[in-house]
Image: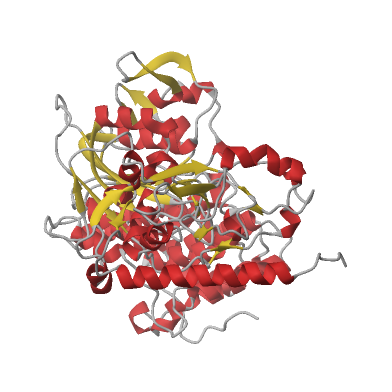
């Protein structure tokens, strides 16, 4: 059953109860399911497009001829006769074929009556956009790499880029027009009339109809949208990319969250030729990246969209763009940053929580803020700013409230307000990026200690694991992969990252290996009591640790685990080392060293950079380390005793 209208359709929005707007997502969903059940179409895309068309029709009738809707609701008229001419008056760019209703008039009237309580000309456009995103989300987004940007992140990016009233704004993959509407809303709060054009391109027909309706309602005549693929419709004008009907001299501000993913890679040679990053790049004899004359066979869309956004900027223009973390930390993308450095300056990097785009996608993202250099201007030698957001306003399931009803924490507003404050403690300055690493949290190594940890480690030397290796105190090796065909062939435990818990190993017996497989790896791994296993690759368990003891060191260790061995236990005991590795500050530094490729994280050689307190000799830490060591040793002794009492298992 649909929600019944409870107020006069002609009542102004200011007098409509606030819950009417708050209920829009649920109202849209109920309308959608009503259409799904009662129409001849079961395709989500078609139904959403029809909803967008109805939305545009209501807005156009309010703006041009309010009586037209009343006449239509009285019956006897066709929606295809009444509304397309009205829509063309407020938005002449929409093609005639886009304005055709395929639903029966009885259904269309039902939907119009549901929207009758809301004046779209006055309703906040972001409310309508979010309501449509809630509807579209589980049905049509994701398969084309489209994952809508959370509004809290949109607001933060707009505030950081701070578009001025006279400046032009562009989004080449505008989706539901979230960036465009928010940018115009931000400009409208500043002094002066917001006159700079608001422009966007959207490839998906249904989203284009929705974004057109949203922009018309929120922005008015300075809003301009194109239906098409911005990668193919962009025109090359020297180093600038332009679009028909848009400013010819480039944009002041570009904001984007482009589609990403290797599965939707761009392979058309005519498109690749337009872009410098569509060609292969190699390092020359001096280690500098240079573009070759060889066209790539394909390129990830986010790379081409990054170049498009930069080249759509006028000299001195600014860009904020959401990209997968792989672009920031993958060595294979180093040439991209070499090209970017030639084009301008990194203004800032914002590390986004992994939950930012969940539950839509688990892909980890960050935000790049960039300024294109002016005409004849060399690369600006200014410091970049980096910050890390750990909360985004919702959890991985999309829930925006905690179990006690309080709002889920959200770091984006605080970080946005602090970007332009040089004294902000939330943003760190980076003089120079190293080794083509651009993952923001990598540069936030000075973590704050709790008072308890500060007292516990007072006076301890802070060293890196690499330093301990150089001093001959530890050794780090990695495990191996015997192959899935070896699983279940014997009773030798195969230890994986999922088998580590509470500093001990709990191996899955169904993955146990044969004696022959064990002998193949035992001489290479040379495991012994006191060895520390740490997960260094995977999804969520990186940093999980365990210690091997006499009863469980006869095993094979997976390649996702690092084997950390204390070489001189009399100087640095493995228990002291494990204790230090698990301190909160050390685990935070460890997190900052993890780079994520799509959904999988890895530490690589950055593990050597992990800094920790060297808890040797007597100090404030002595009693705590001794209790920790005694507890682990006693547990190991008890487990060893229990194991010796057990007979062989019988398969049931």
Residue at the location (50% across, 21% down)?
296
Q: Is residue 159 above or below residue 196?
A: below
Residue at the location (48% across, 25% down)?
271
Residue 318 in view, yes or no: yes
x and y percentages locating residue 322 in the rendered image:
38, 48
Q: How is the image coloured?
A: secondary structure
Q: Is residue 242 above or below residue 79?
A: above
Tell me if 425 is positioned left or right of 79 in this view. Answer: left
Residue at the location (64% across, 52% down)?
554
Q: Which residue is situated farthest in the right direction here?
A: 652
x and y percentages locating residue 586 in the rendered image:
34, 58
Tell me if 245 is positioned left or right of 23 in this view. Answer: left
- The answer to which of 652 and 140 lies nearer the viewer is 652
- The answer to which of 359 and 231 lies nearer the viewer is 359
- The answer to which of 369 and 254 lies nearer the viewer is 369
x and y percentages locating residue 303 in the rendered image:
43, 35
Tell me if 282 is positioned left or right of 261 in this view. Answer: left
Q: Quadrant of the N terminus?
A: bottom right
Tag count: 0
- The image quadrant of residue 393 is bottom left
Q: Is residue 123 above or below residue 294?
A: below
x and y percentages locating residue 366 in the rendered image:
37, 49
Q: Quadrant of the C terminus?
A: bottom right
- The answer to which of 417 and 411 lies nearer the viewer is 411
Residue 109 in view, yes or no: no
């Amino acid at each position: 059953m649909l929600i019944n209208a409870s107020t006069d359709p002609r009542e102004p929005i200011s007098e409509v109860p606030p819950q009417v707007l708050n209920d829009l997502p649920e109202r849209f969903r109920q309308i959608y399911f009503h259409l799904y059940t009662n129409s001849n179409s079961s395709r989500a895309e078609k139904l959403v497009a029809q909803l967008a068309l109805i939305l545009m029709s209501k807005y156009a009738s309010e703006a041009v001829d309010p009586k037209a809707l009343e006449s239509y609701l009285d019956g006897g008229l066709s929606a295809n006769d009444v509304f397309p001419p009205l829509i063309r008056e407020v938005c002449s760019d929409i093609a005639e074929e886009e304005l055709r209703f395929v639903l029966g008039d009885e259904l269309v009237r039902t939907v119009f009556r549901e929207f009758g309580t809301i004046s779209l000309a006055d309703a906040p456009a972001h409310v309508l956009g979010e309501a449509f995103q809630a509807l579209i989300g589980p049905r049509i987004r994701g398969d084309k790499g489209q994952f809508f940007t959370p509004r809290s992140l949109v607001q933060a990016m707009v505030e950081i880029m701070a578009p001025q009233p006279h400046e032009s704004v562009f989004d080449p993959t505008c989706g539901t027009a979230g960036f465009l509407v928010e940018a115009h809303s931000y400009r409208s709060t500043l002094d002066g009339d917001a006159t700079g054009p608001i422009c966007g391109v959207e490839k998906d027909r249904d989203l284009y109809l929705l974004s057109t309706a949203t922009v018309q309602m929120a922005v008015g005549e300075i809003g301009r949208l194109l239906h098409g693929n911005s990668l193919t419709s962009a025109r090359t004008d020297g180093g600038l990319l332009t679009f028909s009907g848009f400013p010819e001299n480039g944009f002041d501000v570009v904001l984007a969250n482009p589609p990403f993913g290797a599965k939707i890679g761009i392979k058309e040679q005519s498109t690749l030729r337009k872009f410098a990053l569509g060609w292969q790049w190699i390092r020359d004899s001096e280690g500098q990246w240079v573009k070759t004359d060889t066209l790539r066979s394909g390129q990830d869309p986010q790379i081409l969209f990054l170049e498009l956004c930069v080249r759509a900027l006028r000299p001195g223009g600014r860009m904020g763009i959401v990209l997968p973390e792989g672009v920031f930390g993958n060595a294979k993308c180093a040439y991209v940053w070499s090209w970017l450095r030639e084009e301008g300056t990194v203004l800032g990097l914002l590390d986004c929580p992994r939950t930012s785009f969940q539950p839509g996608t688990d892909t980890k993202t960050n935000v790049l803020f960039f300024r294109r250099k002016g005409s004849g201007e060399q690369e600006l030698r200014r410091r970049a700013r980096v910050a890390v957001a750990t909360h985004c306003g919702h959890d991985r399931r999309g829930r925006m409230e905690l179990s006690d009803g309080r709002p889920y924490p959200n770091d984006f507003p605080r970080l946005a307000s602090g970007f332009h404050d040089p004294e902000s403690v939330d943003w760190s300055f980076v003089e120079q990026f190293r080794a083509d690493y651009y993952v923001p949290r990598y540069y936030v190594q000075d973590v704050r200690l709790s008072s308890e940890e500060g007292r516990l480690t007072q006076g301890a030397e802070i060293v890196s694991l690499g330093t301990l290796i150089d001093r001959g105190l530890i050794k780090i090796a990695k495990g191996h992969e015997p192959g899935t065909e070896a699983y279940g062939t014997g009773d030798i435990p195969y230890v994986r990252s999922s088998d580590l818990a509470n500093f001990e190993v709990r191996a899955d017996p169904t993955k146990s290996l044969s004696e022959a497989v064990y002998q193949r790896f035992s001489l290479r791994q040379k495991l012994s009591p006191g060895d520390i296993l740490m997960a260094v690759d995977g999804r969520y368990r990186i940093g999980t640790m365990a210690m091997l003891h006499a009863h469980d060191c006869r095993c094979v260790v997976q390649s996702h685990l690092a084997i950390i061995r204390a070489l001189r236990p009399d100087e640095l005991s493995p228990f002291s080392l494990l204790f230090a590795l698990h301190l909160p500050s050390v685990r935070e530094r460890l997190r900052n060293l993890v780079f994520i490729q799509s959904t999988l994280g890895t530490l690589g050689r950055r593990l050597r950079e992990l800094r920790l307190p060297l808890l040797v000799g007597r100090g404030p830490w002595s009693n705590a380390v001794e209790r920790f060591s005694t507890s682990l040793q006693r547990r190991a002794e008890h487990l060893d005793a229990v194991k010796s009492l057990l007979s062989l298992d019988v398969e049931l």
